[in-house]
Image (tube, rainbow, N blue to C red):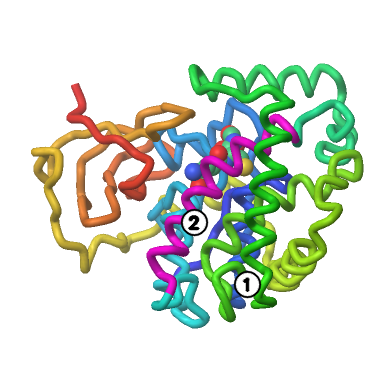
Amino acid sequence: MSDLILHNFAISPFSEKIRLIFGFKQLHWKSVTVPIIMPKPDVTALTGGYRRTPLLQIGADIYCDTSLIAEVLDKRSPAPSLYPPTVNGLARNLAQWADSTLFWTAIPYAFQPAAIPSIFGDISAEEMQAFSADRATMRGNMPRSSMGEAKGQLCEYLRRLDSMLESDAPFLLGAQASIADFSVYQTLWLIRTAPAINPIFDGHPKLLKWMDRVAAFGHHQSETLSSAEALEIAKKAQVFDMDGRNFVDSHGIALGEQVAIMPTDYALDPVVGELVIASENELAVRREDARAGTVLVHFPRVGFQMKRAK
Ligand SMILES: N[C@@H](CCC(=O)N[C@@H](CS)C(=O)NCC(=O)O)C(=O)O
């Protein structure tokens, strides 16, 4: 089987989710560190424009968005499952809430000046300015909460999450961990790393113990890889992950047509290519890149939009 290559950076919460899933499933992986801000030429060579972090690369298959990456890892290594059958739908919906609402509620709270040194380490004022400008461009018109709103809402979400652990079950949805635990954890992890803001967890000992439990999965074993090596692997790969999907037409667009796919919320960079997968929950395009060769770029349906390319 081809190696699992995660394109990620250390302080990325969405990357932390996938790193912990490697630990949960005891999967060996290779780590490519990507730049925190644009430009990211080696990322966009693989994706054709999508810039968000992380990406999973398996040969010349590039999987965007952690909800799809989690599915791919679960298919590759089904036990323990991220989607225990009794809570499958609930776990997926709770994970989606955490990846969107909880994450974007926590971000203004986490990025307050007192927390910056613990989150970013030794960052200069210029670098911080460049980071803020990059993320402002990436967010575009997406509304941003004030600190007061963010803090108040986050406190309420923490109370709700804490109450889910009242029965003393080890994980949010019961005895088994699920995708919901990893999605909720990643955002709270960012806050917990910063002593100036982590007193927000005071009064939630069960939540803190649950966080320790999720953190204990660890990241399993990884080796570092350069982005140049990752591009070379994509270029040499001969096999593509295309089989076993039904064609589900919800757009009136046939396989083989040129399409543009992009997120529905932020970082709206379109990826253009030939539509090769349109299944119940996945879309993928084939595209050519001078450095990466022929690649298949995969997206989940949820959270992405597709149009016929002009
Ligand atoms: N829904 C996406 C969200 C990914 C996301 O927003 N990641 C952040 C980093 S934690 C990001 O892309 N930031 C901008 C960047 O890395 O360029 C997913 O699940 O992968």
Give the percent coordinates (x, y) of residue 241: 31, 62
Name the one closer to the observer, 240 or 160: 160
- The answer to whether residue 295 is seen in the rendering is no
Residue holding disc 2:
94
Residue 171: which disc? Answer: 1
Asked if residue 108 is among those painted magenta in the image, a careful observer would answer: yes
- Helix, strand or loop at disc 1? loop
Which span is picked out in magenta? 87-109
Q: Is 135 placed above or below 85 here?
A: above
Q: Main secondary structure of the magenta part?
A: helix
Circle 2: residue type: Leu
Residue sitting at x 25%, y 60%: 242
Residue sitting at x 57%, y 56%: 183
Q: Is 184 placed above or below 217 here?
A: above
Circle 1: residue type: Phe
Q: Quadrant of the C terminus?
A: top left
